[in-house]
Amino acid sequence: MFKICGLFLVAYIKRVDGFVGCYRGLGPKLCASTISSITYQKLYVKTVEESTAAAEDDEAAEDRR
């Protein structure tokens, strides 16, 4: 039932705003998604590198004992 309502909504938007109205806001959404993905990727890599370095430091400290 909700899918039918969604189709009517898309038809209404297309009738009122035209074809371009269906894609309004797509550019900013793509920019936001790209920035979010890049930020997540860089933070993930940095976190993994730091945790790996900390684990290696702990192993080296144990070896010295």
Image (cartoon, rainbow, N blue to C red):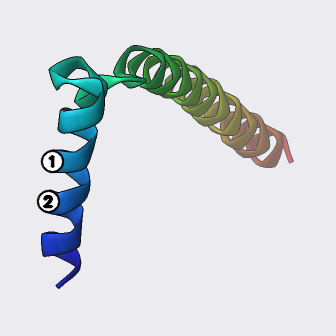
The answer to which image quadrant residue 34 occupies is top left
User: Of tags 2 and 1, which is closer to the observer?
Assistant: 1
Q: Position of residue 6 (x, y in %)?
A: 22, 63
Circles 2 and 1, Cβ within 8 Å, touching? The answer is yes
Dot 1: element: helix
Front position in the image: 17 or 55: 17
Task: Residue type at mark 1: give it.
Answer: Ala
- Reading the image, the residue beneath label 2 is 7
Q: Position of residue 23 (x, y in %)?
A: 27, 25
State the count of labels.
2
- Reading the image, the residue beneath label 1 is 11
Query: Is 11 left or right of 30, judged from the image as shown?
Result: left
Name the quarter where the N terminus is drawn.
bottom left
Q: Residue at x 77, y 44 (%)?
A: 58
Residue 58, above or below 22: below
Crowding at mark 2 (Cα within 10 Å: few <14, some 14-19, many 20+): few
Q: Residue at x 44, y 25 (%)?
A: 29
The answer to which image quadrant residue 22 occupies is top left
Task: Residue type at mark 2: give it.
Answer: Leu
- The disc at residue 62 is none
Q: Position of residue 37 (x, y in %)?
A: 47, 27
Alpha carbon separation for disc pair 2 and 1? 6 Å
Q: Residue at x 61, y 27 (%)?
A: 49
Query: Is 2 left or right of 45, judged from the image as shown?
Result: left
Query: Is 18 left or right of 63, judged from the image as shown?
Result: left
